[in-house]
Image (cartoon, rainbow, N blue to C red):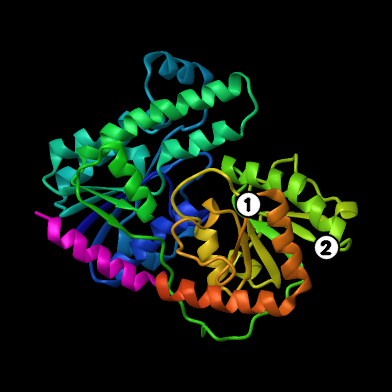
Amino acid sequence: MRILQLCPKPPRPSLDGGCLAMDAITRGFVAQGHTVKMLVVSTEKHPFNIEKLDYDYVQSTAIEAVSIDTALHPTAALKSLIQGKSYHIARFYTKSFINKLEEILSNSQFDIIFLESLFLSSYAPIIRAHSNAKMILRAHNVEHSIWEGLADETPKGLKKWYLYKLAAQLKKYESTAVNDFDALITITDKDADTFSNLGATLPMHTAPFGMDFSSPVDEPTKEVNHVFHFGSMDWKPNIQGVEWLTKEVWPVVRKSISNAKLILAGRNMPDTFRSDPDKGIEILGEVKSASEFLQRPGIMTIPIHSGSGMRVKAIEGMSAGLPTVSTTIGVCGLDLVHRKHALIADSANDFAQALIDLLRNKEQANELAISGKKHIRKKFSNPLIISELTEFLEAIKP
């Protein structure tokens, strides 16, 4: 197939789970012999730098980028609020991207045009006007659900009202825009059900994040000696989750295990999080290599309470053989069994007790790590996921 992949940020370098998820699809398509052309948005938060990309990747994707200012501008946000439009979507709609998209569609023919995320959905009319390709929306999340969750976690006041308003505008847009496409790809079955309840009537297929596994599944695990959180700290659900972890969960752990250690790592760490030796908290901030960091002998935590889709870091960490403690939302779509593949807890006391149990019982932590690793590697093999996705796309292409 000839595929045009439109991305709201550059998949490489892979700075967060969204980047990894987009890159996995690209790698999978290329590996199966499909022709891929990429057009990506370059932003201040996620700049495109072709010099950081390897030659083979550039050649195999013919990647191009258009710079868009997606920073929050209060005046534009207020205007969208008054007009009842989603500011999240409006930020990504620019004449420069339209011009580049029209140029590509005029010069090349495609079977499939693959839009990564709702944020690029406003370009659907442009695509329809210039191409007969099947137009596919890949929803990394149910976007309005994330903002509803953030609003739920926010104290009463103007900010809470504003977040609910943003969520409502997104929900209205999401429920109508999705049916402008020929098919919808979701990350989890739960998200597919949510879209159906919103009124989606188009063909749907679930394609979770996948990885290419090389190391043996039965290699020995490490004896845990600390707890950690690893994730992009410019994403609000992560910030709220880590605040909950440090303020409500960790004091309970330290009361029971006085020398317990918590490491917080991830890019764009807010200044509000600081190392505190007296509390056993160490801030690493951004790390050079995610894969190297995930080789540490720690207990991985996923403490988020809002969001949808799938946590890529959960798949990465568990596939590396890390025992995991998560909220229910944090492992949505992974089909994990509590106490077999991971420990799942939603209250602060239960989450803390799970961490205490694993820190004290190295054998339990090891068994959990091995079982979780086997489950993830069996279910989230990228070649298998791409094969099933390709079969679905082949059935609907022109």
Q: Which residue is mark 1?
A: 303
Q: Residue at x 37, y 22 (%)?
A: 85
Q: Residue at x 20, y 50 (%)?
A: 203
Query: How crowded is the residue under tag 2: few (<14 C-alpha within 10 Å), some, or many (20+)?
Result: some
Q: Is residue 219 above or below residue 279?
A: below
Q: Position of residue 125 (x, y in %)?
A: 20, 33
Q: Position of residue 376 (x, y in %)?
A: 47, 71
Residue 80, by quadrant, is top left
- Specify whether residue 312 is painted magenta: no
Q: Main secondary structure of the magenta part?
A: helix
Q: Position of residue 164 (x, y in %)?
A: 50, 26
**Disc on the earlier residue, 2 or 1:** 2
Q: Which residue is mark 2?
A: 260
Start-end of magenta stretch: 380-398
> As shown in the figure, which amino acid type bears the numbered disc 2?
Ala
User: In the picture provided, is 372 more to the left or to the right than 93?
Assistant: right
Q: Which mark is residue 203?
A: none
Q: Is residue 116 visible?
A: no
- Give the position of the N terminus as an image quadrant: bottom left
Q: Residue at x 26, y 67 (%)?
A: 388
Q: Nearer the viewer, residue 184 or 45?
A: 184
- CA gap between label 2 and label 1 equals 18 Å
Q: Is residue 343 above or below residue 369?
A: above
User: In the picture provided, is 91 more to the left or to the right than 266?
Assistant: left
Q: Is residue 55 above or below residue 197?
A: below
Mark 2 lies on a secondary structure that is: loop
> As shown in the figure, which amino acid type bears the numbered disc 1?
Pro
Mark 1 lies on a secondary structure that is: loop
User: In the picture provided, is 87 more to the left or to the right than 159?
Assistant: left
